[in-house]
């Protein structure tokens, strides 16, 4: 295996000047194309990051303190929720010059990963890094809904949603067009916000344990 190569040494320097992932991009591209072509996912997809550990010298190696393996190559991955099948993915190579200035990294990643599956009535689930009202609106225009936890520090949210303090075990609902933001005060100084453009109604239940569904 030490002599196995996936690119041509003669043209490597030229390709690396335009593509940091040039040594593997051709093979990875064909792999992803096959993932898209050979599997029809269900109605629910998810988007997240995954760190593939590596010890080799690499210009785009990432350090992530919260991962079991601290160093590696970070990939953005889209997967089928039910089967865990990887549908699409690409490596994080640093600043992307093609990303629009008015678009966040999370929004760019979601749209790129979901491109083969837009316009087909599916839903995508994501965490707070990717979730925003802007991306929810953009996806709805392509007949795709979004469900995800949301960072309450985002500027697009009203001040009433940004506070971490509130009535314990209380639920607050905010509505904007076809998207609903549900904020639950599970602890005295910590609340959780969930944005959904999939659910048109939100059911709240109170019981003796003071938990909310």
Image: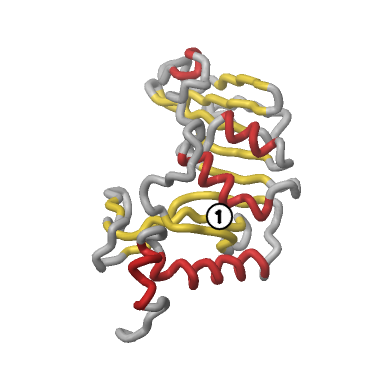
Q: Which residue is mark 1?
A: 78
Which residue does the image show at 46% across and 25% down from the upper left? 154
Which residue does the image show at 48% across and 42% down from the upper left? 99
SS type, badge 1? strand
Residue 195 in percent (x, y) is at 58, 31
Position of the C terminus, as image quadrant, is top right
Which residue does the image show at 55% across and 55% down from the upper left? 78
Residue 54 in percent (x, y) is at 30, 66
Residue 64 in percent (x, y) is at 30, 50
Q: Quadrant of residue 16?
A: bottom left
Position of the N terminus, as image quadrant, is bottom left
Relative to the observer, which residue lies in front, 96 or 183?
96
Relative to the observer, which residue lies in front, 101 or 83?
101
Residue that protrudes farthest toward the top in the picture:
160
Badge 1: how crowded within 10 Å, few (<14), some, or many (20+)? Answer: many
Residue 84 in percent (x, y) is at 57, 61
- Say whether residue 149 is left or right of residue 13: right
Which residue does the image show at 43% across and 44% down from the upper left? 97
Residue 148 in the image: above or below residue 170: below
Here the colouring is secondary structure
- Say whether residue 87 is left or right of residue 186: right
Residue 14 in the image: above or below residue 171: below
| Tag count | 1
Residue 154 in the image: above or below residue 47: above
């Amino acid at each position: 295996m030490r002599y196995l190569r996936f690119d041509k040494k003669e043209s490597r320097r030229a390709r690396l000047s335009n593509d940091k992932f040039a040594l593997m991009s051709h093979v990875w591209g064909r792999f992803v194309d096959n993932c898209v072509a050979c599997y029809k996912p269900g109605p629910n997809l998810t988007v997240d990051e995954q760190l593939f550990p590596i010890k080799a010298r690499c210009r785009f190696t990432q350090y992530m303190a919260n991962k079991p393996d601290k160093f590696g190559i970070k990939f953005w991955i889209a997967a089928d929720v039910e089967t865990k099948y990887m549908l699409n993915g690409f490596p994080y190579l640093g600043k992307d010059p093609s990303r629009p200035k008015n678009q966040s990294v999370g929004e760019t990643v979601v749209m790129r990963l979901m491109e083969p599956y837009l316009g087909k009535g599916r839903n995508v689930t994501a965490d707070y890094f990717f979730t925003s009202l802007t991306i929810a609106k953009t996806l709805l225009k392509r007949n795709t809904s979004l469900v995800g936890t949301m960072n309450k520090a985002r500027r697009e949210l009203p001040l009433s949603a940004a506070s971490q303090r509130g009535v314990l075990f209380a639920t607050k609902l905010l509505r904007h067009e076809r998207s609903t933001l549900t904020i639950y005060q599970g602890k005295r100084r910590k609340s959780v916000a969930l944005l959904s453009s999939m659910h048109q109604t939100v059911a709240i239940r109170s019981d003796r344990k003071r938990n909310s569904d």
